[in-house]
Amino acid sequence: RGDRPLMSFRNAPLAVIHDVDKETLLTPEIRAEIDKHVAKYPPEWKQSAVMPALTIVQDHNGGWLTQELMDQLAAYLDMPEVAVYEVATFYAMYDLEPVGRHKICVCNSVSCMLGGAEALLEHIEKRHGVAPGGTSKDGKFTVKEFECLGACRHAPAVMVDKAYHECVTPDAIDKIISKLD
């Protein structure tokens, strides 16, 4: 290596301090929930709580994230807005547009596709009139294709809200949908 200096690594992410009173961001309830996750990390690593924080904000906003809410979260966690956007747009669990009261996520991994996920999606579209990415006319549910639900052994897998269903058939999905409020 000769006389080249060793690479130096930052000990923590780059913090961006926003000129805003944090007590005006989000709601006290949301801040308290986020703070529970922030407490799991050293103070200089509070940005690591961005994923659970996004989930909390999304859940409190009817299942989707607005730019304003993401900006407030960035300020609350002392991170660049773009860093929050990158996470929110990368992971399929976050929605940037209004969704139905329930989310039906159909796994589209290889195992699930071989197990009948494509036929399941076609059935939902034909029977219920909702294609992947769409919401039922009554606002009851949104259908999403999801990269992997981690249930390959019992494909096809479907997650409705936060409940997993495995070995889902067209009849089974009809029963699930009929029980949604």
Image: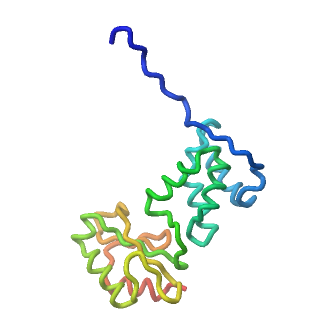
Count of marks overlaid on the render? 0
Locate residue 6, reporting x and y percent. Answer: 42, 17
Quadrant of the drawing holding the N terminus: top left
Q: In which quarter of the image is residue 13?
A: top right
Q: Is residue 152 left or right of residue 98?
A: left
For this orientation, the residue located farthest to the left is: 114
Q: Which of the two residues, 41 or 140, is positioned nearer the viewer here?
A: 140
Locate residue 62, reporting x and y percent. Answer: 60, 72
Q: In this view, does 29 lie to the left or right of 53?
A: right
- The colour scheme used to paint the residues is rainbow
Q: What residue is shown at x 56% (from left), y 70% (from top)?
A: 63
Q: In which quarter of the image is residue 33?
A: bottom right
Quadrant of the drawing holding the C terminus: bottom right
Locate residue 93, reporting x and y percent. Answer: 47, 63
Q: What residue is shown at x 33% (from left), y 77% (from top)?
A: 168
Locate residue 90, reporting x and y percent. Answer: 44, 56
Q: What residue is shown at x 31% (from left), y 68% (from top)?
A: 108
Q: Which of the two residues, 61 or 161, is positioned nearer the viewer here?
A: 61
Q: Is residue 106 above or below residue 141?
A: above
Q: What residue is shown at x 39% (from left), y 73% (from top)?
A: 165
Q: Is residue 103 above or below residue 2?
A: below
Q: Is residue 49 above or below residue 65?
A: above
For this orientation, the residue located farthest to the top is: 3
